[in-house]
Amino acid sequence: MNIILLGPPGAGKGTQSAGLVERHGMKQLSTGDMLRAAVAEGTPVGLEAKAIMDRGEFVSDEIVSKLIDDNIAAMPADQGAIFDGYPRTAAQGEQLDEILAKHGRKLDYVIELSVDLDALVERITGRFSCANCGALYHDTANPPAKEGVCDNCGSIEFKRRPDDNEETVRTRNKEYTEKTAPILPRYEERGIVKRVDGMADIDAVAASIDAVLKG
């Protein structure tokens, strides 16, 4: 299976991608991760990308497509791929089709984690962690057993990410909607877009995704 996993920040794409890797042996192809790896390894594409970034310019669609191409070429033919953060534009969608066809693959599903924006705001703005051991908590869904004390290490110091605020969450959701809008029609026409409830608990979302993959 080769799938695109969509959803706004906080919808749980990273968690679900990790689950798919563990359960099905799929490979997560995140453009950001691939770019950093290519630069660190000094591959031809990585060197080209580094020169562009060092000039303060954005990496082109062509560079990103080369990264995708190189990574798929290195994968076993029977290993499925999860595309995370790509494609972001209609042009990239066309390039992905060409790359997959080149390697004898096709895109099976585009799975979107649907979220309720107000509930997503509550989910994200309520997150915090132990400053000492990193244990994760939530104001309402998963507070410490004893208020102000970490269940794991007993620390009384906690922290929140500065971007876990309502304005940022709503801005990111708007950006996601605007960026994904151009790529969905081509996949809707093929009948491969599937939506699952991203607000359900992690195991329920995973089960819904697995049900899609089983057809």
Image (spheres, rainbow, N blue to C red):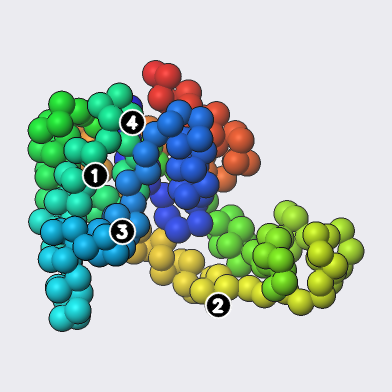
Label 2 amino acid? Pro
> In the image shown, does 123 or 58 lie closer to the viewer?
58
The quadrant in which the N terminus is found is top left
Q: Is residue 165 visible?
A: no
Q: Which comes before the other along the chain, label 2 or label 4?
A: 4
| Closer to the eye: label 3 or 4 | 3
Give me the C-alpha separation between circle 3 and circle 4.
20 Å
Q: Decide: marks 2, 1 in contact (CB < 8 A)? A: no
The residue drawn where x is 33% and y is 51% is: 30
Which disc, if any, is residue 162? 2
Label 1 amino acid? Asn
**Image coordinates for residue 178, horizontal then vertical, percent:** 29, 59
Label 4 SS = loop
Q: Which comes before the other along the chain, label 3 or label 2?
A: 3
Binning the other alpha carbons within 10 Å of mark 1 as few (below 14), some (14 to 19) or many (20 upward) gives: some
> In the image shown, does 43 or 22 lie closer to the viewer?
43
Binning the other alpha carbons within 10 Å of mark 3 as few (below 14), some (14 to 19) or many (20 upward) gives: some
Binning the other alpha carbons within 10 Å of mark 2 as few (below 14), some (14 to 19) or many (20 upward) gives: few
Label 3 amino acid? Ala
Binning the other alpha carbons within 10 Å of mark 4 as few (below 14), some (14 to 19) or many (20 upward) gives: many
Give me the C-alpha separation between circle 3 and circle 2.
27 Å
The quadrant in which the C terminus is found is top left
The residue wearing badge 3 is 37
**Image coordinates for residue 81, horizontal then vertical, percent:** 32, 36
* 186 displayed left or right of 5: left
Q: Which comes before the other along the chain, label 3 or label 1?
A: 3
| Closer to the eye: label 2 or 4 | 4
Label 1 SS = helix
Which disc, if any, is residue 80? 4
The residue wearing badge 1 is 71
